[in-house]
Amino acid sequence: MAKPTKNYVCQSCGAVSTKWAGKCDSCNEWNSLAEEAVTAAVPKGMGTKKGRSLELVDLSGQSHERLPRLVTGIAEFDRVTGGGVVPGSALLIGGDPGIGKSTLLLQVVCALSKKNARCVYVSGEEAVDQVRLRADRLGLGQSPVELASATSVRDIVATMEDGGKHIDLLVVDSIQTIYVDNVDSAPGTVTQVRTSAQEIIRVAKKRNIIVLFVGHVTKDGQIAGPRVLEHLVDTVLYFEGDRSHQFRILRAVKNRFGPTDEIGVFEMANEGLVEVANPSALFLSQRQADATGSVVLAALEGTRPVLVEVQALVSVSPLGTPRRAVIGYDSGRLSMVLAVLETRVGLQFSGCDVYLNIAGGIRINEPAADLAVAAALISALNNVAAPADAVFFGEIGLAGEVRQVPQPDVRLKEASKLGFGKAIIPRRKVVKEGRKPDPLVVSELSHLQDLADLLRDQGGPRRAIA
């Protein structure tokens, strides 16, 4: 038997070191190296035994069996996964503690179990009775879901390979609590997470079982464990939202069987997570139309247009270094927009505190939000309300130019459905003949100076400062 050796593995990035250090050289994380035992053995099939020749097939060939997607009936979940979950696929869902990951997956397995799919829910964090209590609270206590409380990969794999009745879907809650008994390290370590996931996914691919892993996240919001875990699975979903808000966003950041950056919107209620069919109306339900520093952004999340409120507050700073506070938007991009407004338009933000917020708890990452952010900042600085019935979208360049963004027609159509009458957008190319007219009045801009002039001319009344 090979002699076990000791290595030190970073619990943040998975880098291996032969000696302990206070800081990981790969990811620069402090106090992340943990000691793990490694058996120096020759991998199976790589010793003196000769490998077998692979069976090669044509790209144009067809599979022996085409398995259809399993549609859960929860429209927002099906939208994010690309129209349902694919048999034999592995999905990883991460999110902050208490955000509702276990609640969502329990609703998913209960919905599928009512469609004659055999669903197994394995919890490594809760007892069976605790899962039953949550199901009763959600009104799902009579669903034909099979429960188990286990943490051993050996037991889970034996259940998956049981020939008595085929499993259609398996939930593992969570992957950080599962362990392989022949690996000498604690559950949740990089080696255990990687080995456990590999073994479960291997059996799932072999037997066409859908596996849903729940993953913990780090303080930075990334899924804990080695990065290879996200490469092993077919789909990575993040469950986002502020626990002080009732809204939850399910976002796909990787999907081998559907579009990425697709989102599903849920509302946390007493009966669990409720789908939000029209998130734009929900995000704008509490907007004050005549407030300064408030504009509406027509964003695009995946294939879904979403209208959200962008709020800005600019106040004179008593500090030598003014504050820049951002919620729901990239702080680096805010600094760029402020620099362009100061340099190219002549507005002064250097002596002011700047606060920016995307209302509703949603996070916007696309560059099309630049024009709405700039409009909110100009409105807040001049204390003049922007047009209440206008939407904004467009990308800003460092020269102050306003650049085009993808799918403007989809954004305009969504704004028209919600009753908006104006849109401030980048200047488009020459309009082709036969093109349908815009559903609302469009003002096209080519430079940020045009935006400042338009807000001065068409803006609402100046608000009195109390």
Image (spheres, rainbow, N blue to C red):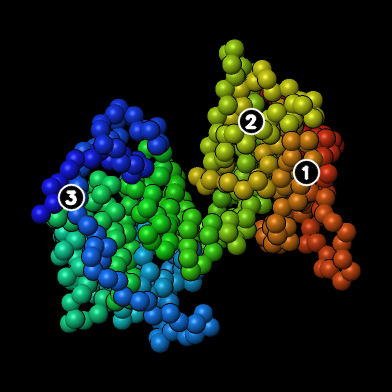
Viewer-nearest of discs 2 and 3: 3
The disc, 2 or 3, on the residue closer to the chain's N-terminal end is 3
Q: Is there any visible trace of residue 33 in the rendered image?
A: yes
- Outermost residue, front direction? 48
Which residue lies under the disc numbered 1? 402
- Say which quadrant the C terminus sits in: top right
**Residue visible at 78% across and 62% down in the picture:** 439
Q: Are marks 2 and 1 in contact (CB under 8 Å)?
A: no
Provide the secondary structure element on which disc 1 rests.
Answer: strand
Q: In terms of sequence position, does the residue under pointer 1 or pointer 3 come before the other?
A: 3
Please, is residue 292 above or below residue 247 in the view? above
Q: CA distance from mark 2 to mark 1?
A: 17 Å
Q: Which residue occupies 20% across, 47% down?
A: 38
Tag 2 secondary structure: helix
* Residue 335: assigned label: 2
Q: Is residue 127 left or right of residue 245?
A: left
Mark 2–mark 3 distance (CA, rounded to whole Å) = 50 Å
| 378 vs 37: above or below | above
Q: In 3D space, how far apart are the residues under numbered discs 1 and 3 (Cα atoms)?
A: 59 Å
* Amino acid type for the residue under numbered disc 2: Ser
Mark closer to the observer (1, 3): 3
Q: Which mark is drawn over residue 39?
A: 3
Which amino acid type corresponds to the residue marked 1 in the rendered image?
Val
- Indicate the position of residue 335 as horizontal and vertical percent values: 63, 30
Q: Left or right: 431 with respect to 371?
A: right
Kindly indicate whether the residue at mark 3 contacts the one at mark 1 (C-beta within 8 angstroms). no
